[in-house]
Image: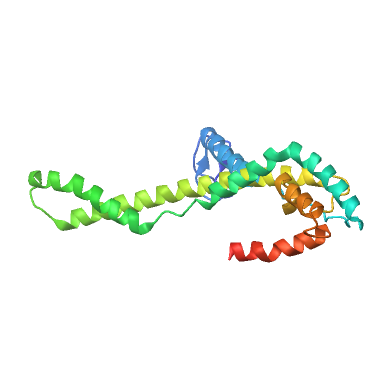
Amino acid sequence: MICKECGAKIENLTRICPHCGGRALVDDELETWSFLADTAARKRHEMPAAIAPNEPTAPPADTAEQLAELERLRDYFVKYSNLYQVADDLRYIESGFSHPSFLFWGLAGGLAAALVYFPLSPFLPHFVWTYYFVLWAAVSAIGYLRAGRRYEHRAAEYAMLRRQAENDLHVMYNHCEGCFLPLEWTPPPRINRMIAALRTGEVRSVQDYIGMDAPMRAARSA
């Protein structure tokens, strides 16, 4: 056995450490503590490190070359359209998460306590409001804390999934040679609109298109 306080090894069949007087850990407790420590360490290391996307290269100067390169980039990124969709879906799911409301659980706890306490009140020797409020507080606190733990677990799980999806997206982007588009401009539908704008003469270059679209995107997000 091993002392819980000082870590000294205890040879005799005693649960009191002769060195410091602390309580000893028996084998089953040692296994439990080891399991908890391993689980905590694994949880801490589950979140992978973020992979940063590369900086875009300089775009070709000629419009015809830009069109040819845009078509090449579109053909490359269209093979990985599912990565964009997965990352967007996970961000959308995360945006719907909200921390449990203490007000909601206060009302729910009061209702649950009433449904339990008032039907039993005729059988109690004395109707005491204190018991009802204690039950109300207990139900509300337990429900709120359990909901909070579920929220934290779910949020951490989806944060890890989103990190993995974004890393896959960034790795795919980094493997594209000579990409002069920022990552957010690489979804194939956006490249198609860019190609159409260049072919119709709406813009003269990729830089003009990105600069023209930026104020409109800012206005839509405001």
Residue 34 showing in the rendered view: yes
> The N terminus is located in which quarter?
top right
Q: Quadrant of residue 104?
A: bottom left
- Compared across the picture, whether 73 is left or right of 141 comes to right
Residue 19 showing in the rendered view: no
Establish if 33 lies above or below 211: above
The residue shown at (52%, 33%) is 28
- Compared across the picture, whether 47 is left or right of 58 comes to left
Could you say which is closer to the camera, residue 206 or residue 175? 206
The residue shown at (76%, 64%) is 211
Q: Quadrant of residue 200?
A: bottom right
Could you say which is closer to the camera, residue 61 or residue 120? 61
- Compared across the picture, whether 90 is left or right of 207 comes to left
The residue shown at (76%, 50%) is 196
- Compared across the picture, whether 120 is left or right of 80 comes to left
Could you say which is closer to the camera, residue 89 or residue 39? 89
Place of residue 121 in the rendered image (x, y in percent of width and height, measured from the top left): 11, 47
Place of residue 60 in the rendered image (x, y in percent of width and height, measured from the top left): 91, 55
Could you say which is closer to the camera, residue 14 or residue 55? 55
Place of residue 129 in the rendered image (x, y in percent of width and height, measured from the top left): 15, 57
Establish if 201 lies above or below 16: below
